[in-house]
Amino acid sequence: DIQMTQSPSSLSASVGDRVTITCRASQSISSFLNWYQQKPGKAPKLLLYAASSLQSGVPSRFSGSGSGTDFTLTISSLQPEDFATYYCQQSYSPPRTFGQGTKVEVK
Amino acid sequence: EVQLVESGGGLVQPGRSLRLSCSASGFTFSSYEMNWVRQAPGKGLEWVSHISSSVSTIYYADSVKGRFTISRDNAKNSLYLQMNSLRAEDTAVYYCARGNGYYRHFDYWGQGTLVTVSS
């Protein structure tokens, strides 16, 4: 099975900060990497797919990069509504594993 | 508008069974793969199972293999998860999610249904 490892597990940031979250796959997954945002008590929401493609309706301050085993999610200027938990997920092969999550908290 | 609505969750004793349903609307259900994803209280997301649009491929997480069965009824726009021999560690919110396109990303999710396994 492909293991997905996110770092950091949590971070504290302020509105306006640039935030970067990394995700590493245990083997190459090409660009089969997706990012989700989840707020407490809500279902996850797709942000980016194919490593860098922005889902319709998602603000352009979110961006993604990487291929193979190393990926990043960047929020260029953190907004109040962005405080949430972020998950990466590989869709290269089953099981379609998620990372453990990165909680973005108010500094 | 795409909608996914789960139902069937509740409190169940260990070793018993439960069947979850996911009702889909707003898209051509028969054209999309579907998935179940769960989240234990205070924990991260865990992919559970996948079924292709034509039911030609089905996958399960090792943690549920042999106990859970995914199925779908394209005529009824519905996805199901039959859960047998339930354990305390199956306690979670269960989400259905649509898989889309070549990259199989989960672009729409239901609101989730809570399954609690406890005596």
Image (cartoon, rainbow, N blue to C red):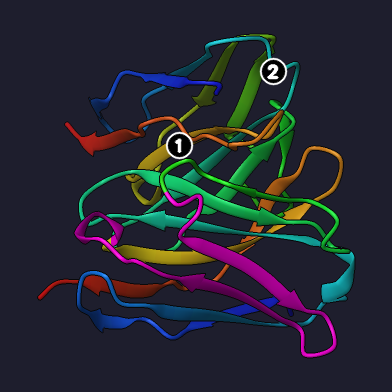
**In the image, is residue B81 above or below residue A74?**
below
Could you tell me if the residues under marks 2 and 1 are in contact, i.e. CB atoms within 8 Å? no
Report the residue marked by disc 2. Answer: A29
**In the image, is residue B71 above or below residue A81?**
below
- At which x and y percent is residue B52? 80, 57
Q: Secondary structure at mark 1?
A: strand
Q: Residues within 10 Å of mark 2 (few under 14, many from 20)?
A: some
Segment tinted magenta in the rendering: B64-90
Q: Marks 2/1: CA distance?
A: 16 Å
Task: Write down the chain letter for disc 1.
Answer: A
Residue type at mark 1 is Tyr
Query: To which quarter of the image does residue A65 belong?
Result: top right
Name the residue nearer the viewer: B75 or A4.
B75
Report the residue marked by disc 1. Answer: A87
Query: To which quarter of the image does residue B36 belong?
Result: bottom right
Whichever of labels 2 and 1 marks the residue nearer the N terminus, that label is 2
